[in-house]
């Protein structure tokens, strides 16, 4: 792997060629806000536009998303210029108008001095509409879990994650990876007794033989056993009691 | 058909075709472009077939007969061209057919009522090449369109088809790239990236597999140059792609065609299949050691799939969404392999550049934009259609000389170029040369080559609203600025045109424009602000009039206008009162009429029907 030195905010830092600016910045303690990027999902990033930074290379400056901008020799990054702040502020104001009920967005926008958007607000179901349509949920489902139960449906403002035809998915294993990955907590997953409900589908949970708490959907165990060959008996106990 | 396996065989075959061709044979050529077909050219063709049969004429002996691609002068279709007399008949109907055969095929006479008549000078012109619409054009890209039958490879070969390829296959691949570089050809899809250097950077990336692709996902409203090329001269695109593939070392190519272009798909598919049978595609092309083949992929109807990275996703069978192009597609494109994606018109220029040489091509156009460009000239102009002109022609020449001036003698106000994310250029800049860099400098862009002419009755705020509405619908929804910013911009524009505009709206619009320009993910988003920015830049007084005076100076925005009848001009003919759908116009015969404003829905029917110009918009 080829090592590359770049400059971030006037400081020389080292990374690996084609590693993302965001990763290199974070490794060096330089904070950049980001929502749709997840280190475990290689295809993630680029959609929320919150992590915009100035990239100077070859005498040219571009505003780029740090989460997927590859570092190459001669690159200089500025994360806190007037332009970066102004455009990020604009992006956050639009996000706040889209999901006024999201605490995550409200906090982030508040840091840039926005408490109320100047534009009309979107209203979703139950006033708890928090989805910023970043698509991380569907990428996790596809790339990490490997079941492709959900994808980003429709286009323009109607774009949202969902199962095909909004019907209970035949491939969803109820693992909840999408829920854990979602940056704004927009996906609903409810565990009641030994039943989990997610994406309009119900899953029976396996109960830990030690503590008696239901902890994993049967369908998820089936999937793990099928794809990894792991012994089914291993799932009799929850991670705390193995 | 036997495949051609060497350059000698190709030339022998071409010679045989030429020997059997009778150039003096009176030939009828019927335009079968989509526009003319919609106007009934199939019926005209059928009438010709019947007439030829009834008269006992033998096709190929007494009369030649073929259907061709689009001649470009679509508003006057169905078009029928005659060779060798070079007569062009406009708006031909089946009932005209026997007269044409009688007079212009059997004899040397012209059917006067079917030839071109200039709306301004009233002059009539029979000769195709003398009609102003064609006279000022320079047809390189459209060289064959209208002359050849797109379904016949023989006709293409008779018009020097595959000569560029035969020459290219004897050249060193790097020399081909140098030739394209030297020609100065820049991407005709809108980006204007130098084609040769794109090819060179792709070739420089080490890889065992490379791809070439053709972008035929033309989606700009009113633009149809790529459609006409794919429909009317499919082999020219295929030939260009084979040459490009040979130059960069690709063995597979894809043509991504808009599914709304069924005729383009059909003609391309047929052309690919014939080209394969004849040895221009497949293994060991023309007896060389080069293998290459092409597949067609039909788009699913998303505007954004004309954007290169979204197009490649779609070709891979994934959702057509753009992705960051921080690593360029010449490095990692289709299936993450080095790839070259060029537009239809770009590919179709390649064979003639190779055959005639870079210097020949670079002799046309301007310093920074070489060659010619096909434009679809539409809007409020007398002659609309497809035109090909050398780069650098001024807006004025395009609108006045070729377009024949603004429709109905109205005042020319602006042109909109570059498709929905292009910009509006005012009359004051009508001496501006049309080339890549000049258009960008004034806040518009070349785009794929749509040119919409606007007259004094066009409201520029309404124009901005129209394009933003289009983009709201077509945004893929992946990134925040485009997905959530455009609807907010539209909301403000709606308010302004409905009389609810307020102080600061223009500034808020400009801020949102910046968020899009700097912050959006793909080319669609980063250029989406152009319609708003360019209209604010050149027509700010119209925005101000809407916001502060609650007036629409062009008389377009319904909420901001009132219709009144001019007392001095009204003759009391009662026509407006009869036609008013709201029945809100009253007045006795031969007395001045009045409009009841409270019930008026501002449909404008009264103004349209008034013969005395007595209905005014205020």
Image (spheres, coloured by chain):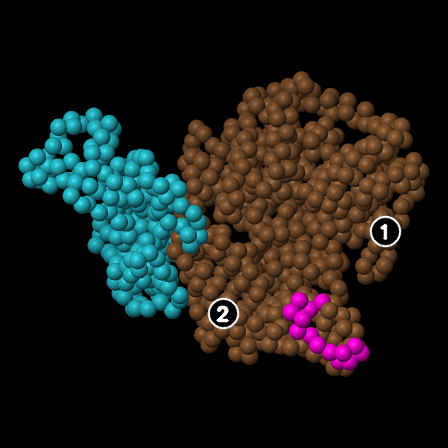
Chain colours: A cyan, B brown
Vertical comparison of B362 with B266: above or below:
below
Question: Looking at the image, which is closer to me, A227 or B173?
Answer: A227
Residue A122 in view of the camera: yes
To the question of a shared chain for discs 2 and 1, the answer is yes
Chain ID for label 1? Answer: B
Question: Looking at the image, which is closer to me, B500 or A218?
Answer: A218
The residue located at (33%, 59%) in the rendering is A99
Q: Which residues are magenta?
A: B579-592
Q: Residue furthest top?
A: B2
Q: Position of residue B301 (x, y in %)?
A: 52, 44
Q: Position of residue B587 (x, y in %)?
A: 73, 78
Which sits earlier in the primary sequence, circle 2 or circle 1? 1
Chain ID for label 2? Answer: B
Image quarter of residue A55: bottom left
Residue B497: in magenta span: no
Q: Position of residue B216 (x, y in %)?
A: 57, 41
Q: Quadrant of the N terminus of chain B?
A: top right
Residue B495, label in figure: 2
Distance between the alpha carbons at the discs numbered 2 and 1 = 49 Å
């Amino acid at each position: 792997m080829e090592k590359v030195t770049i400059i971030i905010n006037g400081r020389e830092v080292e990374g690996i060629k084609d590693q993302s600016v965001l990763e290199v910045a974070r490794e060096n303690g330089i904070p950049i806000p980001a929502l749709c990027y997840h280190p475990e999902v290689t295809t993630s990033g680029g959609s929320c536009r919150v992590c915009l930074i100035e990239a100077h290379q070859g005498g040219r400056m571009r505003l780029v998303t740090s989460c997927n901008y590859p570092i190459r020799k001669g690159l200089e990054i500025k994360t806190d210029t007037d332009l970066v702040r102004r455009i990020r502020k604009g992006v956050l104001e639009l996000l706040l108008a889209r999901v006024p009920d999201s605490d995550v967005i409200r906090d982030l926008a508040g840091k840039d001095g926005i408490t109320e958007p100047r534009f009309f607000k979107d209203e979703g179901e139950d006033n708890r509409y928090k989805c910023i349509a970043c698509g991380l949920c569907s990428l996790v489902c596809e790339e990490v879990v490997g079941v492709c139960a959900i994808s980003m449906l429709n286009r323009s403002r109607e774009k949202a994650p969902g199962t095909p035809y909004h019907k209970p998915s035949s491939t969803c294993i109820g693992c909840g990876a999408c829920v854990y990955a979602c940056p704004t907590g927009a996906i609903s997953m409810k565990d009641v007794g030994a039943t989990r409900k997610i994406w309009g589908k119900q899953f029976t949970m396996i109960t830990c033989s030690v503590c008696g708490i239901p902890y994993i959907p049967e369908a998820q165990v089936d999937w793990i056993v099928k794809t990894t060959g792991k012994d089914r008996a291993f799932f009799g106990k929850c991670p705390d009691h193995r | 058909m036997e495949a051609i396996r060497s350059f000698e065989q190709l030339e022998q075959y071409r010679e045989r075709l030429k020997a059997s061709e009778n150039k003096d044979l009176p030939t009828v050529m019927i335009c079968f472009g989509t526009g003319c077909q919609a106007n009934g050219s199939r019926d005209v063709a059928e009438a010709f077939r019947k007439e030829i049969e009834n008269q006992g004429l033998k096709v190929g002996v007494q009369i030649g007969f073929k259907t061709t691609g689009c001649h470009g002068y679509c508003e006057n279709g169905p078009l029928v061209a005659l060779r060798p007399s070079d007569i062009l008949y406009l708006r031909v109907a089946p009932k005209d057919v026997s007269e044409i055969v009688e007079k212009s095929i059997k004899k040397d006479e012209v059917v006067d009522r079917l030839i071109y008549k200039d709306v301004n000078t009233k002059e009539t012109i029979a000769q195709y090449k003398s009609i102003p619409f064609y006279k000022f054009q320079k047809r390189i890209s459209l060289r064959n369109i209208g002359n050849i039958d797109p379904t016949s490879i023989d006709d293409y070969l008779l018009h020097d088809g595959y000569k560029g390829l035969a020459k290219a296959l004897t050249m060193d691949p790097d020399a081909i790239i140098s030739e394209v570089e030297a020609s100065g050809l820049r991407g005709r899809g809108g980006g204007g990236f130098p084609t040769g250097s794109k090819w060179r950077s792709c070739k420089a990336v080490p890889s065992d597999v490379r791809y070439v692709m053709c972008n035929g996902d033309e989606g700009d409203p009113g633009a149809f140059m790529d459609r006409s090329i794919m429909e009317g001269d499919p082999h020219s695109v295929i030939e260009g792609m084979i040459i490009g593939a040979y130059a960069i070392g690709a063995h597979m190519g894809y043509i991504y065609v808009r599914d709304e272009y069924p005729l383009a798909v059909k003609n391309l598919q047929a052309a690919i299949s014939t080209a394969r049978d004849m040895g221009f595609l497949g293994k060991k092309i023309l007896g060389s050691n080069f293998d290459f083949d092409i597949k067609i992929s039909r788009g699913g109807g998303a505007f954004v799939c004309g954007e290169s990275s979204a197009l490649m996703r779609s070709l891979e069978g994934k959702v057509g969404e753009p992705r960051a192009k921080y690593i360029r597609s010449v490095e990692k494109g289709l299936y993450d392999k080095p790839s070259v994606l060029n537009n239809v018109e770009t590919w179709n220029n390649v064979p003639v550049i190779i055959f005639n040489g870079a210097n020949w091509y670079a002799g046309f156009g301007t310093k920074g934009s070489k060659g010619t460009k096909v434009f679809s000239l539409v809007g409020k102009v007398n002659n609309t259609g497809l035109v090909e002109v050398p780069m650098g022609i001024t807006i004025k020449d395009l609108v006045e000389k070729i377009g024949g001036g603004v429709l109905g003698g109205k005042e020319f106000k602006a042109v909109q170029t570059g498709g929905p994310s292009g910009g509006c250029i005012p009359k004051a800049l009508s001496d501006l040369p049309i080339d890549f860099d000049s258009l960008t400098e004034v806040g518009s862009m070349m785009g794929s080559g749509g040119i919409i002419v606007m007259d004094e009755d066009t409201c520029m705020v309404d124009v901005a609203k129209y394009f933003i509405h289009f983009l709201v619908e077509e945004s893929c929804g992946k990134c925040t600025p485009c997905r959530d910013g455009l609807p907010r911009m539209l909301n403000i524009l709606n308010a302004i045109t409905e009389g609810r505009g307020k102080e600061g709206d223009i500034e808020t619009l400009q801020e949102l424009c910046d968020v899009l320009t700097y912050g959006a993910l793909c080319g669609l988003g980063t250029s989406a602000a152009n319609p708003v920015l360019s209209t604010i830049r050149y027509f700010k007084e119209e925005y101000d009039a809407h916001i502060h005076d609650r007036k629409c100076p062009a008389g377009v925005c319904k909420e901001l206008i009132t219709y009144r009848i001019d007392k001095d001009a009204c003759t009391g003919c009662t026509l407006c009162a009869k036609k008013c759908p709201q029945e809100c116009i009253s007045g006795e015969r031969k007395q001045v009429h009045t409009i009841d404003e409270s019930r008026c829905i501002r449909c404008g029917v009264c103004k349209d029907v008034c013969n005395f110009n007595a209905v005014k918009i205020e």
